[in-house]
């Protein structure tokens, strides 16, 4: 049995963000809270979007103070602006942090606080105001997902899942990614690859998610290198599309051990989400593939690896392909030097097991296993 519930309109075209005002008017908005971060503003990406709102006869208030790994205070400030300014709709422009802040602010606009009381699945009682999203990275998938992730006072990245968190509109405009720095193309793109791979290999079997995940992995394997090193416009556009496909996949079938382990790495050591996933991915692939060699062989082939004569050998070649991908993209092969220390391991291991992605991981996992994987990823021990 599987359900496909995706109440989000997806518009994909270069330059499409310059007409988003009409879309927001169509959603019934008059005064829009634009949620973004200082980098997006400095890159000039808001100019055409705010112009489009004006042309459509809408007024806008900009909340431009989104921080990386946003917490409840950040979301509450945005929600306060929404209320005080009499807004009736929200537009997120940015990466995962901006989109997740916009979702959390929308949640607080129509539901009483505290925000973190809604941790978990389907605890949000009331629908959000109309929410439109324009991603400016090629990784998060949050423009189509049912989740927001908010960091609590103890560094725990708290997931809140609800169908009300699925935006009404996602505008995919690859022109906005032209100025994205190469290291962010690489790390957010590896986040998208991780979404697709974990969705495809985990214990939740979902036919629609599988199709989206496989296609996302193929597109990312073809495009992530030229998108990163040359900013090739077609490659960037394919990465943006693939990251949204991967977002659809994991909204339907969720994730696995890489995300369970990477959130604590970000929460305690401040390693950006995509980078934390990219470093962990080959280690967790090597661990997980024993639990489902066929799925990981299919992953390898989606990444362009030829059949090696057996599922486990093909899967192992897939791990090497991801190690090579990281190397080509300038992503380190270990956490050493990125702020992660062994002293953090006990807290990181505890929080790993709070994740709802642990029970659906393709291989059963113990605290000792996670400790061993963190140690290997810290020191750069060869995954295979
Ligand atoms: Fe992610």
Image (spheres, rainbow, N blue to C red):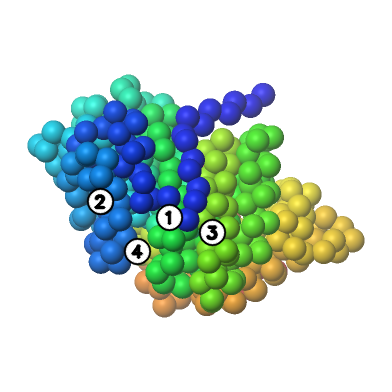
- Residue 78 seen in the current view: no
Residue 237 disc label: 3
| 9 to 302, vertically: above or below | above
Residue 333, horizontal then vertical, whole percent: 55, 74
Q: Nearer the viewer, residue 221 or 316?
A: 221
Q: Which residue is mark 4?
A: 270
Q: Mark 3 vs mark 4: which is more N-terminal?
A: 3
Write down the residue under mark 2: 50
Contact between marks 1 and 4 (CB within 8 A): the answer is no
* Rendered position, 12 above or below 163: below
For label 4, the crowd category at 10 Å Cα-Cα, with few meaning under 14, some 14 to 19 and many 20 or more, is some
- C-beta proximity under 8 Å, tags 3 and 1: no
Q: Mark 1 = which residue?
A: 15
Quadrant housing residue 340: bottom left
- Counting residues from the start of the chain, the first of labels 1 and 4 encountered is 1
Label 3 element class: helix
Q: Spatial distance from mark 2 to mark 4, Cα to Cα?
A: 32 Å
Residue that protrudes farthest toward the right in the picture: 309
Tell me which numbered mark, 3 or 1, is placed earlier along the sequence: 1
Q: Earlier in the sequence, mark 2 or mark 4?
A: 2
The Cα atoms of the two marked residues, 1 and 4, are separated by 33 Å
In this view, the residue in front, 140 or 260, is 140
Residue 127 image position (x, y, % from top left): 33, 25
């Amino acid at each position: 049995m599987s359900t496909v519930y995706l109440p989000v309109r997806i518009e994909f075209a270069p330059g499409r963000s310059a007409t988003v005002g009409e879309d927001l008017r169509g959603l019934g908005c008059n005064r829009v809270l634009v949620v973004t971060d200082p980098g997006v503003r400095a890159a000039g990406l808001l100019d055409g979007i705010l112009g489009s709102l004006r042309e459509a006869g809408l007024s806008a208030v900009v909340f431009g103070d989104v921080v990386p790994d946003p917490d409840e205070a950040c979301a509450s400030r945005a929600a306060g602006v929404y209320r005080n300014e009499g807004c009736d709709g929200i537009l997120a422009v940015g990466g995962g942090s901006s989109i997740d802040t916009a979702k959390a602010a929308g949640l607080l606009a129509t539901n009483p606080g505290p925000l973190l009381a809604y941790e978990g699945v389907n605890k949000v009682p009331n629908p959000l105001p109309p929410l439109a999203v324009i991603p400016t990275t090629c990784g998060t998938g949050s423009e189509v997902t049912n989740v927001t992730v908010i960091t609590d006072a103890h560094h725990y990245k708290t997931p809140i899942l609800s169908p009300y968190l699925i935006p009404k509109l996602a505008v995919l405009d690859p022109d906005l990614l032209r100025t994205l720095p190469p290291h962010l193309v690489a790390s957010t793109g590896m986040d998208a690859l991780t979404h697709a791979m974990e969705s495809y290999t985990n214990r939740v079997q979902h036919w629609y998610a599988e199709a989206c995940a496989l296609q996302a992995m193929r597109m990312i394997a073809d495009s992530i290198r030229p998108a990163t090193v040359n900013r090739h416009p077609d490659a960037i556009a394919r990465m943006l599309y693939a990251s949204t496909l991967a977002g659809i996949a994991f909204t339907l079938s969720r994730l696995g051990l890489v995300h369970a382990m990477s959130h604590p790495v970000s929460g305690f050591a401040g390693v950006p989400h995509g980078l934390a996933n990219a470093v962990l991915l080959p280690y967790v692939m090597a661990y997980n593939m024993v639990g489902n060699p066929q799925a990981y062989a299919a992953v390898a082939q989606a990444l362009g690896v030829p059949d090696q004569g057996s599922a486990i050998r093909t899967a192992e070649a897939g791990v090497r392909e991801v190690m090579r991908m990281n190397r080509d993209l300038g992503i380190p092969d270990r956490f050493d030097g990125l702020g992660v220390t062994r002293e953090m391991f006990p807290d990181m291991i505890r929080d790993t097991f709070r994740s709802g992605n642990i029970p659906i991981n393709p291989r059963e996992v113990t605290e000792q296993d996670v400790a061993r994987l963190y140690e290997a990823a810290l020191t750069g021990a060869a995954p295979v």
